[in-house]
Image (cartoon, rainbow, N blue to C red):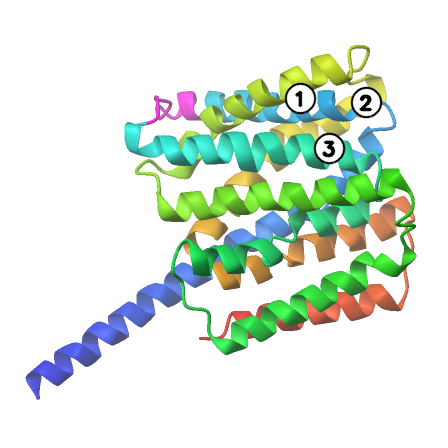
Amino acid sequence: MKRGRVATRVRATTWDLCASVMRSAFHLLIVAIFLFGGAWPVTKAALAHATPMWFAVGRAGLAALVSALLLAALGRLHRPKRADMPSVLALGLLQLGAFFVLAHAAVAMVEAGRTAIISAVVTYWLIPLSVLVLGEKVPAHRWVAAGLGLAGVAALAGPWAVDWTDRTQLTGHLMLMAAALFWTLAIVATRKWPPRTPVFELLPWCFGLATLLILPFALVLEPQGGIFGPSWPYMLYIGLIVAPIGTWCVIEVGRRLPGAVASVAFLLVPAFGVLVSTLWLGERIGWDLALGGGLIVASVALAARE
């Protein structure tokens, strides 16, 4: 009897702990939705007076600087430990560096709303990789949730409205899918080899690595490019606020939630991005926005169920 009561108590404690972690992750997800969901429309507006690669360099460089200054002021700026290096390399080179290169190049070719959707859709990569690499077991209802989410993405993206014979459009969409893959690989890496140091304290090093990766692309592809007058307010907003705070939130959500839940939850980011693009940039609106948004919200609610 006593052994049974202990087992019940352990199960209840484990359940409470998991529920607490899920709740804290969803709080961070809300912040990420508002920051990253609106980031691509802001970036699209900024590219009227900036070139994509130099904007990406500025975004990563400013984020490295502001996070380093903040940590220095708090007395928490230090070099990563050896055990932190897999996460620093994965986040800096894949989630930030490679993702920024591909997504910022693509946003010049593709609508901002579509960029927000496809670049953030880690669902089609994260669930299979979580199963194959991390050995996670995905309940049937979360596969259904992923299917609903992808149906919502299809409605929002409206692939039937794209001229797939246009090489620029095709290239832009392939680049966005590759960007989502690099983001997914970083999530898998941080879950498989979690850092010992809090992720926020690793951000200057991650953004610094990303800056070093993006800079050669800017120098080679855009020798006459840069960030010019009217784009600087956008640059400061993205680099000083969205990049450091939003990235920290996204990384923590990816680490704390099961792969199937995180991949579906991240779909709220592009849904909000489409809404902002529609209201601010005047991009198209119709039945697809209502249907896609509804399917995504339903998929997140279903995925969050235990």
Side (left or right) of 282 relative to 31: right
Q: Residue at x 80, y 39 (%)?
A: 171
Q: Residues within 10 Å of mark 1 (few under 14, many from 20)?
A: many
Amino acid type of disc 3? His
Q: Amino acid at mark 2?
A: Ala
Indicate the quadrant containing the N terminus: top left, top right, bottom left or bottom right: bottom left
Neighbours of disc 3 within 10 Å: few (<14), some (14-19), many (20+): many
Residue 257 seen: no
Q: CA distance from mark 1 to mark 3?
A: 12 Å
As drawn, 281 above or below 233: below
Q: Residue 77 has which mark?
A: none
Quarter placement of the C terminus: bottom left
Q: Position of residue 201 (x, y in %)?
A: 40, 31
Q: In the rendered image, which residue does mark 3 sit on?
A: 104
Q: Is residue 243 visible?
A: yes
Q: Residues in magenta?
A: 71-80
Write down the residue under mark 2.
50
Which residue is painted at 80% across and 22% down in the image? 51
Residue located beneath label 1 in the image: 58
